[in-house]
Image (spheres, rainbow, N blue to C red):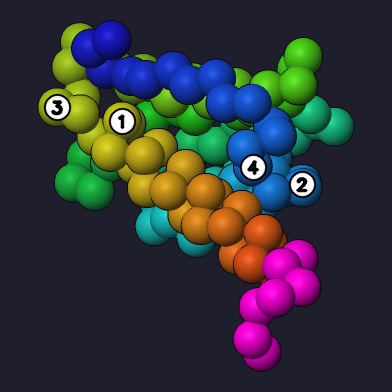
Amino acid sequence: MPGGVKYVIPLKLLPDGALDHLTWIALETPRSRLAHQEDDLIAIVTRTRRIGFPDITVAWVADGNLHVHAHLVYGKNDLGQNAARTDRWLDRLALLATETEDDDDPLRVR
C-alpha cells in the first residue's frame, strides 16, 4: 500500500508481551513518541527527519494476533519509509522471540 504497511502476526510466533516489547522498540526510534495507549493498543507518532511530517503506527492485539498498521498522514507516497521502519521493529521483536526460545532450551550451554 503506498504510504503505509499492514501486518497481522500470530502471537504464538512472538515473545510473551509482544505489544509491550514493540512499544519499547518503537520508542527507541528517533523522533518517535507514544501518542496513545490502552490495554491492547498503542499509537506511535514518528516524525520525518527534515520537515517533521507525522507518520502514525497503530498496533493492537486481537484474536490471537498482533496487528500493525503504519501509514503517512500527508502526501501519497512515503518512499517505503513506513515499511522499512516497521520491518526493523518487527525484526527486533522476532529476535526477542528467538532469544526467549534459547533461554528455555534445557540443552543450551550457558
Say which residue label 1 marks: 83
**In the depicted view, which residue is nearer to us: 14 or 58?**
14
The earlier-in-sequence mark between 4 and 1 is 4
Amino acid marked by disc 2: Gly
Judged by depth in the image, the label closer to the viewer, 1 or 3, is 1
Judged by depth in the image, the label closer to the viewer, 4 or 1, is 4
Q: Which residues are magenta?
A: 104-110
Looking at the rendered structure, the secondary structure element under dot 3 is loop
Q: CA distance from mark 2 to mark 4?
A: 8 Å
Judged by depth in the image, the label closer to the viewer, 4 or 3, is 4
In the displayed structure, 104 sits above or below 31; it is below
Asked if the residue at tag 3 contacts the one at tag 2, i.e. Cβ–Cβ closer than 8 Å, the answer is: no
- Identified at 76% across, 66% down, the residue is 104
Amino acid marked by disc 4: Leu
In the displayed structure, 101 sits above or below 42; it is below
**In the depicted view, which residue is nearer to us: 58 or 32?**
58
Q: CA distance from mark 4 to mark 3?
A: 28 Å
Would you call the spot at circle 1 few (<14 residues within 10 Å), some (14-19), or many (20 or more)?
A: many
Q: Position of residue 50 (x, y in %)?
A: 18, 46
Say which residue label 3 marks: 79
Quarter of the rendering occupied by the C terminus: bottom right
Judged by depth in the image, the label closer to the viewer, 2 or 4, is 4
Say which residue label 4 marks: 14
Say which residue label 2 marks: 17
Amino acid marked by disc 1: Ala
Residue 81 seen in the current view:
yes
Amino acid marked by disc 3: Leu
Asked if the residue at tag 3 contacts the one at tag 4, i.e. Cβ–Cβ closer than 8 Å, the answer is: no
Q: CA distance from mark 1 to mark 3?
A: 9 Å
**In the depicted view, which residue is nearer to us: 61 or 48?**
61
Would you call the spot at circle 2 few (<14 residues within 10 Å), some (14-19), or many (20 or more)?
A: few
